[in-house]
Image: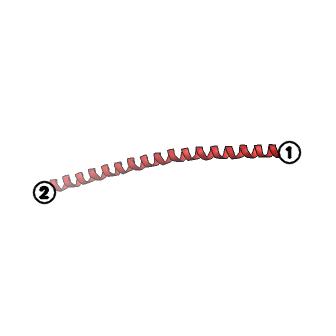
Amino acid sequence: MLKAFNQFFHVLSLLFTSAEDAAVSLNKATGVMRANVETWETTEKLKLEEKLAIAKASRVTSIEDKAA
């Protein structure tokens, strides 16, 4: 009977250890994903700013051409 309790608690200990390892791995993966999203957001923001600058420059050129 004592051996069965010992085995049960050993299995329970292994289960909690595995759950802890999974939580640590998930936390690391989430951190990597968060960093990738932040990089993507920054890249997309820079692309939009560049498109806006090109559009503004095009508008100014168009207005100057009409004035000339």
Relative to residue 4, is residue 50 drawn left or right? left
Q: At x 81% / y 44%, what residue is drawn?
A: 6
Q: Amino acid at mark 2?
A: Ala
Q: Determine which of the numbered discs, if any, sits on residue 67 in the image.
A: 2
Label 2 Cα neighbours within 10 Å, binned few <14 / some 14-19 / many ≥20: few
Q: Amino acid at mark 1?
A: Leu
Q: Secondary structure at mark 1?
A: helix
From the viewer's side, name the closer residue of 50 and 18.
18
Alpha carbon distance from label 2 to label 1 = 97 Å
Instruction: Check whether the beta carbons of the residues at disc 2 and disc 1 lie within 8 A of each other.
Output: no
Relative to residue 36, is residue 58 drawn left or right? left
Q: Secondary structure at mark 2?
A: helix
> Where residue 35 sits in the image (x, y, percent)?
46, 46
Q: At x 15% / y 56%, what residue is drawn?
A: 66
Q: Determine which of the numbered discs, if any, sits on residue 2 in the image.
A: 1
> Where residue 46 sits in the image (x, y, percent)?
34, 48
Examine the rendered structure and indicate whether residue 53 appears above or below residue 10.
below
Q: Earlier in the sequence, mark 2 or mark 1?
A: 1
Relative to residue 4, is residue 64 drawn left or right? left
For residue 63, which quarter of the picture?
A: bottom left
For residue 21, which quarter of the picture?
A: top right
From the viewer's side, name the closer residue of 33 and 1.
1
Q: At x 75% / y 46%, what residue is drawn?
A: 12
> The C terminus is located in which quarter?
bottom left
> Where residue 49 sits in the image (x, y, percent)?
32, 51
